[in-house]
Each structure stands twice: as C-alpha cells, then as structure tokens.
Amino acid sequence: MSGNGKESEVLPVQMGYESKFKFKCHKGIECFTKCCRGIDIMLTPYDILTMKKRLDLTSEEFLAIYTDLHLLESADLPVVTLKLLDDDRKSCPFVQDKEGCTIYEDRPSTCRYYPLGMGSLSYTTDQEAGEADDAFFFTVKEDHCLGFEEDKEWTVAEWREDQGVNIRDEINAGWTNLIVRKKSVPQSMKLSEQSKQMFFLACYNIDKFRQFIFESSFLTRHKLDDALVEEIRNDDIKLLKFGFEWLKSTFFKDGEIIKGDSVAQAPPK
Ligand code: SF4
Ligand code: SF4
C-alpha cells in the first residue's frame, strides 16, 4: 500500500513484466495501514499535480506543507519526499487507522507500486507505453506486511495496470529520463545551481513554472508554436511534459551536459 520502509528487505531477485508474485492488501488484514508509517516516499511530478489538485492547493502551498526537499546525490538533482507527521509512528499525513488512505484515488506512484520496486538501467523509456525497455522490478518485503500470505497471484504487468501506474509512468517518463541520464554522466560534469533550481521549478512547482513561462521574457526568447503555447497555458500535463523536454534540450547535448548549461534566466523566487 505504501512506499519503501526503512526496515524493508529488498530481495535480490529481478523480475520482468511477466514475472509472478502473490499479494493481496485489504481493509480486513491485520497489518492494515502499518505500511503508511515510518516510510520514505519520493514524489513524482505527476504525484504532486494530482495531490495538490485533490487538496485544492497551489503547487507552492503543497510543497511547503507536505514535502521535504532532498538532493538525490547520485544524480545531483533535487527531489521531494512526502513529509511525515511528527507523531510516535511517523505517520503519513493522509493515513487513518480505520479508513486507510484518505487520498486513495490520488495516492503517489510509490504507494501504487508497493510491494514492488522498480529500477531502470538507461534512459531509453518508451514514453507511449510508459514502459522502460530495460526496466526491472523486485518485491519489497517488510516484516509487518502480511499481504504476501494471501492467495492472489499477479504478474507485474497486471499489478501495474490494476494500480494505474502505467499512465503515471508515461507522464513522468521525461522526468525519469532526466534523472537516469544525469546519473549516467560523470560526476565532474555538474549543472549550475540555477539549472538545478529550474529543474525543481519545472518538475515540482508547476504553477510557478507556468507563471515563469507566461510572465517572463521566456516566450520572446523561445519561439514556440501558437498551438503549443495554448496547450501549456491550459493543460498541466502538457506543461509538465513541455518542461521535461525543455530541461533536456537545455541541459544535454550528444550525451553530455552543455557547457555552461544554458538556462539563461534565473528562476523566480
Ligand atoms: S499516501 Fe496513502 S497509501 Fe501512501 S503512505 Fe500515505 S496513506 Fe498510505
Ligand atoms: S498488506 Fe502490506 S501493503 Fe497491505 S496494509 Fe498490510 S502492510 Fe500495508
């Protein structure tokens, strides 16, 4: 039901889309909601979009109230995680003992994938299918999770479809690619602080990113098709995907970071 627990034991068995596993999570199970405490859930750009809409907040408000900012050291890029409550159990702010997840329909991708984790070795993601060619999966087994003892069998592909992660992976593919691609360049090739701030803005603070595009000189400096301009003005998903593509073209060329990477304007504070 939820994300990577600190006490989790990651089994070293790599699984593919057709690999099978047994699992069932339901309200009647003894461990219900135990997985929603003491967890570490990295939020994707689309998670933030859906959760801030659900909570009727701006992206800036959502980030301030519900997230912690981290540096993903392997990629030297900013990422955000769900901020846990300061209670004895370090609970997720959205969990209730009896009801479970109060934002279930808009729960983050990590919660949907659980008890699976996913890895990818390159940035060759098929954005149409939302599947990475070389994606692999593994089960995350926590001592308290009794779902593996239930008698319901899934393939990884069936689980992904049932949990609605296909569509989310497709929308987030450009972000995943940026991170995997950045990890693949030598550590010595660094992005400027300004570029990292722009990554944060475009990937996580979508309302502010839209403001930046439409209220700065961005559209005079970048000649965009009129139809695209209207799309990104009105459609958050189109704006997210545009942001990923723009960051990619700004940061990388021929597999390398563009020298003095070319974010020509400071992001708004
Ligand atoms: S968002 Fe929902 S499913 Fe995820 S940890 Fe919180 S309560 Fe559990
Ligand atoms: S079965 Fe596992 S995922 Fe479901 S509530 Fe229990 S601990 Fe959480």
Image (spheres, rainbow, N blue to C red):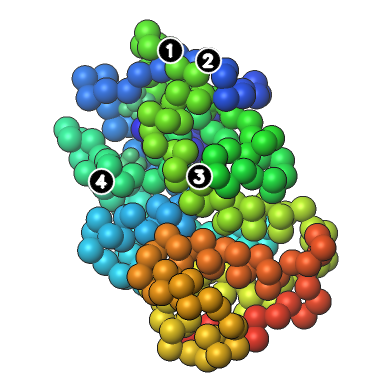
The yes-or-no answer for disc 4 within 8 Å of ligand 1 is: yes
Which residue was labeled with disc 1?
153
**In the image, 257: left or right of 128?**
right
Write the residue at 71% across / 55% down.
181
Q: Amino acid at mark 1?
A: Glu
Q: State which tag comes first along the sequence, 1 or 4.
A: 4
The amino acid type of the residue labelled 4 equals Ile
Q: Position of residue 221 (x, y in %)?
A: 60, 88
Q: How many marks?
A: 4
Residue 231 appears in which quarter of the rendering? bottom left
Where residue 216 sits: x, y (%)? 48, 90
Say if mark 2 contacts mark 1, CB within 8 Å: yes
- Circle on res. 103: 4
Going from N to C along the chain, the mark reached first, 2 or 4, is 2
Query: In this figure, which residue is indicated by the disc labeled 3?
Result: 169
How would you rate the neighbour count of disc 2 (Cα within 10 Å): few for under 14, some for 14-19, many for 20 or more? some
The span from disc 4 to disc 3 (Cα, nearest Å) is 19 Å
